[in-house]
Amino acid sequence: MNQAEILRRIPHRGPMLLVDEIIEETETTIVCKKTFADNEFFFQGHFPDSPIVPGVIQCECCLQSGALLLAGISASGSTSNDDDELPVATRMDSVKFKRMIRPGDEIEMHVTLNEQVSNASYLTGKILLAGKLAMRLDFSVTMSPAPTSSNAPPKKESAS
């Protein structure tokens, strides 16, 4: 599945998509790919002379892959989630970084759905770099109502 299809699958996405392609998917697992371009904004400050992908970005790669997995489960009718809900991260545990990821590196994100209880999903994510473990984490998400214009934060008025 390419990026255009990914964007159709998750309409409530933020401005930073960290999944280039879905390589493989089952009912409980997903494997996604991401190649980091040299000009990614986070390389500017992390670190200018020796850029690496920040840990929080690596976590977000797994979280987005998990969201795609859950969206696929929802679309197949395996859960009661509807299109007006989106997964919101509620916990990350046992986060471990094993290898540095640099500009130009291509990673694979492997995410497994371990359990679903009510509107909570418990997942494990791993990032592989050149076939070797670069990062892993356990995380959970809760399905929450998607923001609408009626529950969006109010705009601040400018002082004139």
Image (tube, rainbow, N blue to C red):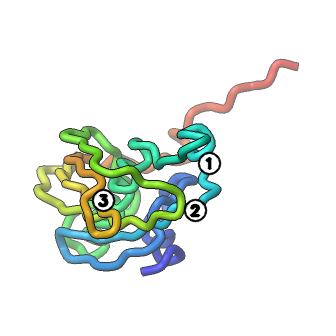
* Mark 3 or mark 2, earlier in chain: 2
Q: Which of the pair 70/147 is nearer the observer?
A: 70
* Residue on which disc 2 sits: 37
Residue located 44% across and 47% down the image: 57
Q: Residue at x 49, y 72 (%)?
A: 8
15 or 142: nearer the eye? 15
Instruction: Name which of mark 1 and mark 3 comes first in the sequence.
Output: 1
Residue beneath label 3, please?
127
- In terms of secondary structure, where does tag 3 sit? strand
Tell me the amino acid under the disc marked 2: Ala
- Amino acid carrying label 1: it is Phe
CA gap between label 2 and label 1 equals: 10 Å
Q: Taking the image as drawn, is residue 144 in sight? A: yes
Q: Which mark is residue 41?
A: 1
Dot 3 and dot 2 residues touching (CB under 8 Å): no
Q: Residues within 10 Å of mark 3 (few under 14, many from 20)?
A: many
Tell me if residue 140 comes above or below residue 153 in the rendering: below
136 on left or right of 7? left
Of the residues shown, which amino acid type is indicated by label 3?
Ile
Quadrant containing the C terminus in the rendered view: top right
Q: Position of residue 110 (x, y in %)?
A: 26, 65
Q: Is residue 128 left or right of residue 148?
A: left
